[in-house]
């Protein structure tokens, strides 16, 4: 297993290398985290099903500009070094919408306004997930209980270039810069997105009865 070497550190981010590529650790607020159990996605056109770990990390524009700029710089470095198959030179054209980062102000969800959004995923290598104290978590249920949409965490990301060609798939896709998901660490709780968690304590009590068939237990 390759050891990481710290290259650069700044506000809300750290950049590492494993000797062949750069990785960036960023802290932010998490949305749609699937860190324990893989999430299942089905392509509406092809019907192809893809399962992966991943999510979206939201970077507040007021505090995370330095971290965002560093991520953009890494992605631009990857783009400029990618081999252009037509010219046999380095440097490819990638449409803005095909980068792993987006402007949250363009989304309908108001919770994403004022943030940059970074999408990350991995379908093959299970990310290492840690508690706040650094302890590695192994139980899938505990992981998915700890990480929810709205909590804060650190994620270790691995930006990479996709040339539009997937194995065992004849279809050609747009070139893009994606972000692999290497690991995550829980940081703190916050207001959950959506309906949020429900405290159901008051709905339960001890069940009295004699276990007869017509006893509904309420």
Image: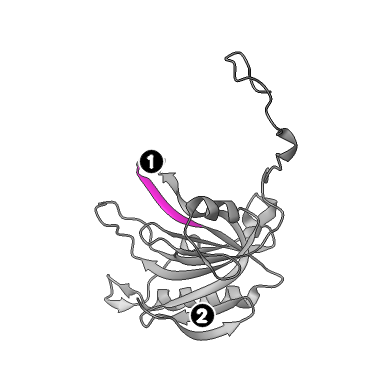
Callout in the foreground (1, 2):
2
Taking the image as shown, residue 7 lies to the left or right of residue 50, namely right
Depth check, front residue: 214 or 194: 214
**Residue ID for mark 2:** 15
**Residue ID for mark 1:** 45
Examine the residues drawn in magenta and state their main secondary structure: strand
Depth check, front residue: 92 or 2: 2
Return the x and y of residue 139 as percentages of the image width and height: 48, 55
- Assign the C terminus to one quadrant of the image: top right
Q: Residue at x 49, y 85 (%)?
A: 6
State whether residue 6 is above or below residue 1.
below
Q: Residue at x 33, y 60 (%)?
A: 164
- Assign the N terminus to one quadrant of the image: bottom left
State whether residue 189 is above or below residue 72.
above
State the CA–CA distance, disc 1 to disc 2: 38 Å
State whether residue 131 is above or below residue 110.
below
**Mark 1 / mark 2, whichever is N-terminal:** 2
Q: Which residues are magenta?
A: 48-54
Q: Secondary structure at mark 1?
A: loop
Specify whether residue 217 is painted magenta.
no
Q: Residue at x 38, y 41 (%)?
A: 45
């Amino acid at each position: 297993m390759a050891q990481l070497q710290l290259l650069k550190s700044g506000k809300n981010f750290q950049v590492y290398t494993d000797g062949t590529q750069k990785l960036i650790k960023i802290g932010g607020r998490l949305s749609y985290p699937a860190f324990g159990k893989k999430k299942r996605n089905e392509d509406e056109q092809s019907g192809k099903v893809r399962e992966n770990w991943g999510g979206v990390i939201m970077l507040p524009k007021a505090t995370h500009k330095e971290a965002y700029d560093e991520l953009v710089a890494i992605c631009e470095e990857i783009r400029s070094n990618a081999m252009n198959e037509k010219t046999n030179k380095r440097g490819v054209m990638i449409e803005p919408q095909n980068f792993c980062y987006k402007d949250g102000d363009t989304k309908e969800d108001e919770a994403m306004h004022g943030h940059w959004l970074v999408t990350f995923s991995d379908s093959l290598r299970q990310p290492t997930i840690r508690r706040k104290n650094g302890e590695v978590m192994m139980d899938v249920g505990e992981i998915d209980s700890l990480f929810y949409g709205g909590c804060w965490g650190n994620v270790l990301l691995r930006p990479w270039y996709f040339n539009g060609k997937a194995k065992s798939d004849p279809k050609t896709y747009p070139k893009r810069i994606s972000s692999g998901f290497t690991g995550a660490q829980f940081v703190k709780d916050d207001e959950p997105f959506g309906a949020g968690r429900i405290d159901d304590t008051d709905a339960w009590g001890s069940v009295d009865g004699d276990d007869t068939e017509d006893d509904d237990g309420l």
